Amino acid sequence: MKMETKENEVQSFNEYQEVVKALQPYIESARTGNGDLSRPAFYDHAHIVGSIGGEFENNTADEFAEAITSLGESPNVQHHIAWIDISGPAAAAKVEFQDWKGFRFTDFFVLYKNGKEWRISGKVYDSHSQN
Amino acid sequence: MKIIQTALIMMLTVSGIAQPIKVETETKEDEIRSFNEYVEVEKALSPYIESAKTGDGILSRSAFYDHAYIVGSVGGEFSAVSADEFAKVISSTGPSKNIKHHIAWIDISGPAAAAKVEFIDWAGLRFTDFFVLYKKNGQWKISGKTYDSHSAN
C-alpha cells in the first residue's frame, strides 16, 4: 500500500478550503441579493429543491439566480458550514442559515470538481417553520 | 378552590405567563418518527442500490426525480447525465452479482437529506456516492448525485 506523502496530506487538507470557496459566492449572494454572483456557483444542470409556505419549489440554477435577485439583500443573515465531506472529485456539504430575509434554512449540497473547479451540482433545503 | 386554581393555571398557561420561555418538548411520537425517517431514506436509496446488483435501469430510474443529474467521471471522462440517461447506463452495465455496499451516513433536516454510500465491485469498480434527497408528498427521492470512481476517475 502506498504511503501518503507530505504533499498529499497538505492537498487533502486544502481541498476543504476549495469547497468552502465554491460555496462562498452562494453564501455571499444571500447577503447581497446578487443573483449573478450566485449563478456561477452552480452547474447549468443543478436544481434547487425545497418548499416555502407549503409550496414545493423546484428551480433551475437560472431561476434560482432570479429568485436571489428579487429577494434582495439580507444584511443580517448569518451562516455556519456544519460539515463538508470529500471523496476525490465529489463532495457534499451542509450549511445552516439564520435570518435570510427572516428565514431559517438548512441546505444540503452535492458538489463536483471538474478539472480544478468545484461547483454545486444539486441542492435541497429545509425552510424549518416555513416548509 | 381547587377548580379556581386549576382554571387560573390553565389561563396562565394559555396566555403564556406561567411558562414564558417554554420550548416545545419532543413527544414520544416525534422521537419514533425522527428515528423512522432514516429507514425511509434507506428505502429511497434501496431501488438504486438494488439496480446496481441487478442491472435494472427501470428500477434505478424510479429512485430519482426527473430533474436529477448524476455527475462524476470514469476513465478520465467527465460525465453529467440525466436520470433517464443514467437508467440506460445501469441497464447496459448489466448485473454485478458480487457488489457490496455500505451506507456511510444519512443526515436529515425536515424534508431535506443527504447521504453517502460506498460501493465495491460494481462491474469491478469502486464508487463513493454523495446524494441529496427531498421528501415530497411523503415520498423521498434522489434530487442529485455526485460520485468518486476512485482508481477509475
Image: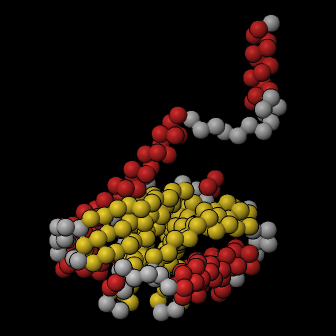
B79 vs A86, nearest the viewer: A86
Q: Which residue is located at x 38 percent, y 66 percent?
A: B117
* Image x and y of residue B131, in percent: 43, 68
Q: Residue at x 80, y 6 (%)?
A: B1
Q: Is residue A78 left or right of residue B96?
A: right
> Taking A76 as reference, is B100 left or right?
left
Q: How is the image coloured?
A: secondary structure
Report the number of numbered marks: 0
The x and y percentages for residue A105 are: 63, 62
Q: Is residue A117 left or right of residue B3?
A: left
Using the image, determine if residue B83 lies above or below residue B75. Answer: above
Residue most toward the right?
A: B17
Residues B87 and A88: in front is A88
Residue found at the very far top of the displayed protein? B1
Q: Residue at left 82%, top 31%?
A: B17
Q: Is residue B91 left or right of residue B76?
A: left
Q: Nearer the viewer, residue B98 or A10?
A: A10
Task: Give the percent coordinates (x, y) of residue B30.
Answer: 53, 40
Nearest to the observer: residue A98 or residue B107: B107
Q: Residue at x 79, y 12 (%)?
A: B4
Does residue A53 appear anywhere in the picture? no
Q: Quadrant of the C terminus of chain B?
A: bottom left
* Residue A91 visible in rendering: yes
In the image, residue B2 sits, relative to residue B92, either above or below, namely above
- Give the quadrant of residue B110: bottom right
Residue B139 spot, x, y in % from top left? 40, 55
Quarter occupied by residue B85: bottom left
